[in-house]
Amino acid sequence: MIPGDFEFKQPASKDEALSMLRDGGDDARPLLGGQSLIPMMKLRMASPDILVDLRGLDDLRHISIGKSIHIGAAVTQHELIGSEELFNVCPIIRETALVIADPQIRYSGTIGGNVANGDPGNDMPALMQCLDATYILESSEGIREVKARDFYEAAYFTALQTGEIVTGIRFPKPESGHGYSYQKLKRKVGDYATAAAAVVLSLSGDNVKSASVALTNLADTPLFVEKAEDILVGSQLTLNTIRATMDAAEAIMEPVSDGRGSREYRTKMGGIMVKRAIEQAAMRADGTAKGGLFGWLKR
Amino acid sequence: MADTISEPSQSETSAERSQKLEGIGCKRKRVEDIRFTQGHGNYVDDVKLPGMLFGDFARSPYAHARIKHINKESALKVPGVLAVLTAEDLIPLNLHYMPTLAGDVQAVLAHEKVLFQNQEVAFIVARDRYAAADGVEALEVEYEELEPLLNALKALDDDAPVLRDDLAGKTEGAHGPREHHNHIFTWSAGDEAATQEAFDKADVVIEEYLAHPRVHPCPLETCGSVADMNPITGQLTLWGTFQAPHVVRTVAALITNIPEHKIRVISPDIGGGFGNKVGVYPGYVMSVVASIVLKKPVKWIEDRMENLSTTAFARDYHITAELAATKEGKVIGMRSHVFADHGAFDACADPSKYPAGMYHICTGSYDIPTAFCSVKGVYTNKAPGGVSYRCSFRVTEAVYTIERAMDLLAQKLDMDPAELRQKNLIQPEQFPYTSAFGWEYDSGDYPTAMAKTLEAVDYKKLRQQQAQMVEDFKAGTSREIMGVGLSFFTEVVGAGPSKNCDILGINMFDSCEIRVHPTGAAIARLGVKSQGQGHETTFAQILASETGLPADMITIEEGDTDTAPYGLGTYGSRSTPVAGAAAARAGRKIKHKAQLIASHLLEVHHDDLEWDVDGFAIKGMPDKRRSMKEIAWAAYNNLPKGMEPGLEAVDYYDPPNFTFPYGAYLCVLRIDVDTGVYSVDRFYALDDCGTRINPMIIEGQIHGGLTEAFAVAMGQLIDFDETGNILGASLMDFFLPTAVETPKWETDHTEVPSPHHPIGAKGVGESPHVGGVPAFSNAVNDAFRAFGGVHTHMPHTHSNIWNYARSLGMIDS
């Protein structure tokens, strides 16, 4: 549990950080909260020669809310939880951040580190796919944008190029009155999900107007359930449509058997999390009839 | 002289003076917590000596492999690395193997073969721990993989791989003949023929396979040591995480040929032991060897993964449990066979005569006339160990066997588990009670404890609620079920009487030495070693009650073999039953001399004096008294003619019997069948530990032990894949519950003192673990009883519970 030798650099500006990363090439890694990278280094599964510390860069620490929401990469989970403005427009961020690890880790861990590392256990990537977020990637060569839904390739493999960092995240402000839920089954505080599902939906009368479903730790990347939209939008939420969504989600899951349970168990739990997240999101969405149509949800 | 110190206020009543002593029964705050809660504990990793080096192990990536070649140069090239030690370097010292507490040997550094993943292969000594870790990373070792043996139940197959080349041709083990190359011992107790007869004539029998999976005590502080061999004086000082420092000193003297008086072993503060710190580990030995070789102090500290994967595990018992009973539910026979997975070396920590510990307490709290048990120990390609994880030797396994078996019998008889237990409990008038295995249970009132428990939880109402939930589930209106788990346990602790217990030939007595200073303050030293139990608080309370000196005026010191009297250490709830008894008796010796001094001061015959809380008074004249404070002063300057000065006492106590704490526990939990997620609604724990020295510390001990019982029953598992890779050897996977997961505990007690212990105390630290594990497991199994469930194994993780529910057809798939 002792990392190898490395050089620790603290750039004064984003541009300086990007040049350090360019010069360091494959031997350099950016550091934010360190909650993924440092354990990997202690296990000597990662051995960068240079760590470029991005925590002091103020231009990565903002949360701005307009037509879309922009969050800097260095914003900590704790800061996400504490932001009332963010909670008012997109409460699922707080709900998700609150089930990440424990308070001590949330003081350090950042949203940028959480999404950029490609760790399938991390919770924010699926949420970002659910919210249809765009990652802003910067290098000394310039800026480009990649959708969260296109960013993840395999465990710890992402669209990030050498010398490139995620500097921020942008996503459309969810419709007012939307329903949401992040359902995470885990063994204990601090654990990665046995299975987790993020759901954001809105209702129009009895019908689903928009719906988005994504999954955490049920494959080597986060999973966006594309078919959920087709199944749910324009339909009523019934046992059948929810069952169809669960089936569509389970069909794309490929969890590994581990201490959390067998592949089969984790897949079934993925389905249950989807079901419970849809039910809770529907209960929270404006337009939900109390009793009546959705009475079965409260059985 | 006496008039130089102030007289105690005569207006104080005995009760007031008694309260000031903070003696037995007082909820005295833990004195050690002042330093622990402020970060001022002194643990082994806090020991820093000038010029100290750091050692780290290169470990085997394979569970079973031949070592073809070790390239020392690869690590020696790393800046800061000073030495690379391998088995070849230890052979000339005859230290490549060390004796274990179980009569086997264990490789200090792997010689020719590795037998479990993460086994110690080379010890790399460097200027600091960073360079040492770089050296470990750089060391090149060439292996040839061999077929691993992981399933203990297949260890004795004819074609099972040979693990221990070093034992080739050895047909006699420490506990009798060896029948196979992977066989360690077969041990049995009880009357096999009579038990068979009982089963033959029984109306009802049950038999079930009960796995008690491999778990780990996982103390917060991992194991470590600092060795300092002074090349000039030949004096070795060894700081380490030792639950039994004197045993370590003796073993060190025996295996190194350093004379015992030249070895000083110091256990500083210890951050939890739970059995993990009883044994002797290669790291301790290598820190000593490296200090001798390099002539500098050498530190070795495990990391978490090393702790979980190499230092002593617990359990790993494959148990069959059988009961024979009449149709009315009277148990007439009990039988159990065990396959015990000991890993690659037999390094169990048990009294030497008992290779399966006290597993033969497995008739439990019941009057069972005949019983037989046998345990077969086998080698596998896993880390050695088999320690008593927060219990007396194999007592958790034994209590699990009987308490699960009683539930299974109740189910077979279609009887309530509480009713079946009540029918079979040993009755108060039967004490002292000799069990079918020969244990002499010293005392107890079991029916009262059981009745109090059932009443406290409104047992009948719980069963009604459960029945309602079964109905709702079957009607499809709910997906939740409820379980009620009972356990009535009896422990056998306080090892122990020399007629039963020794470790490597040393009888398992314990000791206390007390010195009273002239001003009436005192220091007492004991042969045991606290790892968090609060000895500094509670032993002072025993001495306060016995000597009349306030607990606050008594320092308790343990763990330094140069100063503490010889003792066998702390594990198996033996501190209070054995060292606590020695403390009480040492206190009585002080009091005896004090009485003679008081008779001199008061100028009366000592028979005319009577003890009064904190001093002696003339019988019938309570104002004519001398306090212990006055007597202590006189002990140094005003003695009766011919009496030697000073006020000191030593007591070595060899107990006449074990003590038998008991209790009745009840767990209520609900299960969300669709996920296997459970929630513990209620856990009620009634304990009888005899005389209660500090009720607050008892409550803390019970909370801690129940938490570890919860962890074992519901989540802990040291698992391996088919090639012998250890799975989940980190706290990400190994279930160490946090305050969030831990249920709320309700504690209660009865108090039946031990008749043979000087103050009637029985020990308590391990009861909650022993009784808690079956209570949780019974609760989970009980939830499925109405759905055709019979037995599902621990750990009762979400996924295991869900799988079981599905196997019973409770989940559509």
Image: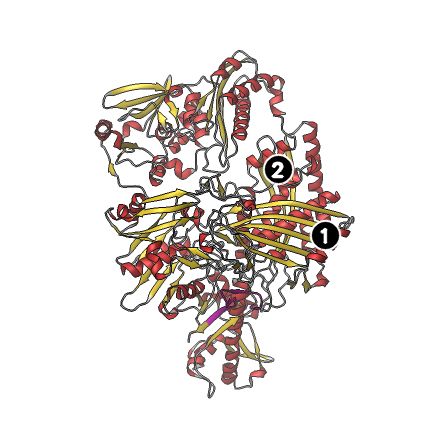
Snapshot quadrant of residue B518: bottom left
Q: Is residue A52 visible?
A: yes
Q: Which residue is mark 2?
A: B670
Instruction: State whether residue A65 is above or below residue B48.
Output: above
SS at badge 1? helix
Residue B577 vs residue B322, the one in the foreground = B322
Nearer to me, A68 or A53: A53
In the picture, the quarter occupied by the C terminus of chain B is top right
Residue B424 falls within the magenta-colored stretch:
no
Give, as a single range, the part of the protein colored magenta. B498-513
- C-alpha span from label 2 to label 1: 25 Å
- Most extreme residue toward the bottom is B641
The amino acid sitting under disc 2 is Arg
Q: Amino acid at mark 1?
A: Gln
Residue B501 is inside the magenta segment: yes
Mark 1 = which residue?
Answer: B422
Counting from the top left corner in percent of width and height, residue B192 is at 68, 57
Going 71% across and 39% down the picture, which residue do you hit? B464
